[in-house]
Image (tube, grey):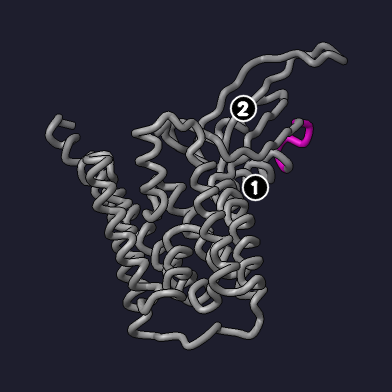
Amino acid sequence: MSRAALIKRLNRKWFWQQVLEYLVITVATLIMVVGVYVFKFPNNFSFGGVTGIAIVLAAVTPFTAGTINFIINMLLMVVGFIFLGKSFGIKTVYVSLLMSVGLSVLENAAPMSGPLTDEPMLELLFAIAVPAFSSAVLFNIGASGGGTDVIAMILKKHTRLGNIGTPLFLVDLVITVMACFVFDVKTGLFSVTGLLAKSLVIDTVIENINLCKYFTIVCNRPEPICDYIHQHLQRSATVFKGEGTYEHKERYIILTVLKRGQAVELRNFIKFHDSDAFLMITNSSEIIGKGFRGLN
């Protein structure tokens, strides 16, 4: 293949990767918009972020939460470009715009006069889970939800704060406590619960998205297993020799990492074709390398 043809092929691959990535970002952001608008706004759940500020300010100003959210996000984008310059990612801009416009469109197209149901705890669960799921998807592909994430990016670049999460959590906590005074204690306590649960849900979703199975296989004949890994699962493996400490017999040890669906296939293959093999299967969400996650 000529150099020009190779470059053209790589450019085409990069283009379709970008299309798929922005499709995922769009869907995740729209899911977040629906979760915030349907479950957070009507119940005044103010557990941090720009949407939390918008909910609190909407109660004491003539503007709607969607309008305030739009204004704050636009101001933060301007601040981001001033302090971050080119490092202010296009993905952050895209998510901020889509989020702000989406909330404004829903306010005009489908106005809500009150909560969707009369079960505040049920609505709190959805107000936590839906946006947190979307945030996890965005974080996992290197995108940002905008809003207070812009403040984190600025602090990280222009200060020596080692842990940006701590000051951001304190800011979110202040917003949440304000809900107790602007609304009532019940709403404030719901908001505190949402703030504490949000990060746990995000971490859990990210971990499950990236979950892989790490195989350590001890066997007598590695060739059939390795052939199955190469040809059927399109993965690779590492093989080395070992010795059992009880009978001092030479054995082969195979190391490989697979996605969850592939792990089930390999486990079933070994079960029917090498019943003497010894398997150790470990969960891992931090597999970095070719075929999994990049170093960046």
Which residue is painted at 64% across and 77% down in the image?
A: 120
Which residue occupies the foreground of this view, 170 or 7? 170
Is 291 covered by the magenta stretch? Answer: no
Q: Position of residue 215 (x, y in %)?
A: 65, 33
Task: Give the labeled residue for mark 2.
Answer: 255
Which residue is painted at 62% across and 43% down in the image?
A: 263
Which residue occupies the foreground of this view, 212 or 164? 164
Alpha-carbon neighbours of circle 2 within 10 Å: few (<14), some, or many (≥20)? some
- Residue 77 against residue 154 in the figure, above or below: below
Which residue is painted at 31% across and 48% down in the image?
A: 17
Q: Position of residue 52 (x, y in %)?
A: 48, 64
- Residue 11 against residue 108 in the figure, above or below: above
Which residue occupies the foreground of this view, 179 or 226? 179
> What amino acid does circle 1 point to?
Val
Quadrant of the image occupied by residue 152: top left
Task: Give the labeled residue for mark 1.
Answer: 264
Residue at the extreme top of the image, as rendered: 248
Q: Which residues are magenta?
A: 272-277
Quadrant of the image occupied by residue 211: top right
SS state under label 2: strand
Q: Quadrant of the N terminus?
A: top left
Residue at the extreme right of the image, as rendered: 246
Name which of mark 2 and mark 1 comes first in the sequence: 2
- Residue 70 against residue 236 in the figure, above or below: below
Which residue is painted at 83% across and 13% down in the image?
A: 245
Cα distance in 3D space between marks 2 and 1: 16 Å
* Residues marked 2 and 1 touching at CB (< 8 Å): no
Which residue occupies the foreground of this view, 185 or 251? 185
Alpha-carbon neighbours of circle 1 within 10 Å: few (<14), some, or many (≥20)? few
Quadrant of the image occupied by residue 26: bottom left
What secondary structure characterizes most of the magenta part? Answer: loop
